[in-house]
Amino acid sequence: MSGWIYLIRNGDLYKIGITKNIINRMRQLKPDEVLVKSYVSNYKELEKQLHYSYKKVRIPQTEYFRLNISNVRSCKRIILFNNNFNYFSLRIFLRLFLYIFIIFSIFIILNFLIFYNLRIVISNSLYLTEKVSFLFMFISFLIKSGVRLDFLNECGFRIQRAIIYLIFTVLLNFISQLLQYYFPA
């Protein structure tokens, strides 16, 4: 069952809550600031996990917490990361694209030092970048995100990262094949 999970601020207190109708709920609560809201499939379980995570700073018998800045950032990340197709998916994709682009640029520079033929430089750089991207895909399974609350969400995040690297690997291989086809040695 899907619903909204949110983190709001009223004065120096923060509320972690859930609802089916976010607009009506925000009208009822009249928060000073809506810090994050996300429509997720496991909203009840996520709320329970967050309440448990911050139980030391919870005001008894309420959904309000005295969170510090670090707790707020962490809570926002958990709520946003929990949604599989959201802003952070795009952020992961762009960050990985930047890494691949930097690696490709480094290989271009290094290949220019060895070869002076532009076709060979680009072809070698694409080939090496493809191999590094494929290697990163396997490494991404080993790197823990540090923001997941349960095993399934952590696995989903790792698979998502690996799929993005795999897409880059296939794309680089395709570009390399096109280059060899249109500009044979």
Image (cartoon, rainbow, N blue to C red):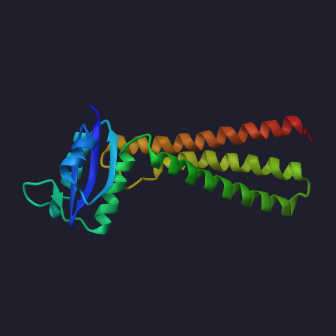
**Image location of residue 35, percent across then percent down:** 32, 57
**Image location of residue 139, percent across then percent down:** 53, 50
Specify the farthest residue to the left: 61
Left or right of residue 171, residue 50 in this image:
left
Say which quarter of the image contains residue 15: bottom left
**Image location of residue 29, percent across then percent down:** 19, 52
Q: Quadrant of the C terminus?
A: top right
The correct choice, above or below, for 47 with respect to 178 in the image is below
Left or right of residue 32, residue 109 in this image:
right
* Residue drawn at the location 68% of the way across and 57% of the way down: 103
Q: Quadrant of the N terminus?
A: top left
* Residue drawn at the location 39% of the way across and 48% of the way down: 81
Left or right of residue 98, residue 65 in this image:
left
* Residue drawn at the location 62% of the way across and 55% of the way down: 98
The correct choice, above or below, for 153 with respect to 29 in the image is above
* Residue drawn at the location 56% of the way across and 42% of the way down: 164
Q: How many marks?
A: 0
The correct choice, above or below, for 13 with respect to 16 in the image is below
69, 22: nearer the viewer: 22
**Image location of residue 80, percent across then percent down:** 37, 49
